[in-house]
Image: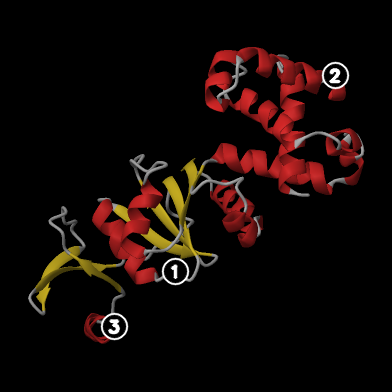
Amino acid sequence: MQNLIQFIEGKTNKKINFFEYNNQSISKNQNVVTFNDKAYVIEFIEDITIDNIKGYFYIFYQQDCELDNLKGILYNLYDNIKLFLYENLLILNSDYKLDINFHTPEIIESETYRNTYIINLGEIYDINIFKSRVSIFNEIPKDFLINNTFFKNYITLNDLIIYKSIYFIKHDRPFYDLIDFESIKTMDINLLNTGICFIENDQNISKTSSSLFLHRNTLIYRLDKIKEILNLDLKNFKDALIFYLTIKSYINFK
């Protein structure tokens, strides 16, 4: 297959994408051809630079990525998209918001058998913002990304904001010294996770009780215990924010 791609590129003097045809719509720079009794799409790649594109951007990350295979899957899933490499990352660009969500990595993994991460960079019209958001993802150690439970396989801008915040707490010494980590170290991990779960359930007693399979009185007791030890009332927004970022930093950067 690679020899065929090289042959076509040599004859046309243009770079191409070559992927299986699955009855998807065909754009003006694509053609359907038959090879070994199978239909394929030849797409002539337009010259793409990050200086002249805008819209919605997504990073698709796999360890030891088979790039052509992943590109083919994405071209089959989505119409009228641009794919390009930037800092060794596969970037998908679209003029409109795509139906990419928490289920999309599972779809791709079922085809590639590789753990897949999608980073939704949002809608961008400024090249400097694009570069900044990509750089934040690149700062994340890939073993942290893969082996830590902080990130799910679909990563939003909010996830990146929280990551940068908890990273800063751990690695900025003056800021770190503002926090009573000695008291936190004495606390049971289940108590800390209860506080996190309470905040992630909109500080709602009923939702958190159901999520943790706890009696509401047990939950209230644990919240009171957190307040007693850390002097943080998780029903208060500012206290909850401090607790959430601090404990996330403590758990993920021990």
In the image, 35: left or right of 166?
A: left
Q: Is residue 106 visible from the viewing direction of this image?
A: yes
Residue 46 seen in the current view: no
Residue 111 appears left or right of 37: right
Please provide percent x and percent y for residue 84.
41, 63
User: Mark 2 — residue?
Assistant: 228
Q: Which mark is residue 191?
A: none
Q: Quadrant of residue 217?
A: top right
Query: In the rendered image, which residue does mark 1 sit on?
Result: 65
The local crowd at label 2, few if under 14, some if 14 to 19, many if 20 or more residues have their Cα within 10 Å, is few
- Report how far apart the C-alphas of labels 1 and 3 lie in the structure: 16 Å
Q: Residue at x 27, y 51 (%)?
A: 78
C-alpha separation, residue under disc 3 versus residue under disc 2: 65 Å
Above or below: residue 225 compared with residue 36? above
Image position of 105 (left or right of 171): left
Work out whether mark 3 precedes mark 2 in sequence or the reverse, and give the earlier one: 3
Q: Nearer the viewer, residue 132 or 76?
A: 76
Amino acid type of the residue that numbered disc 2 sits on in the rendered structure: Glu
Q: Which mark is residue 2?
A: 3
Residue type indicated by callout 1: Cys
In the image, what residue type sits under mark 3? Gln
Residue pictured at 28% horizontal, 58% vertical: 75
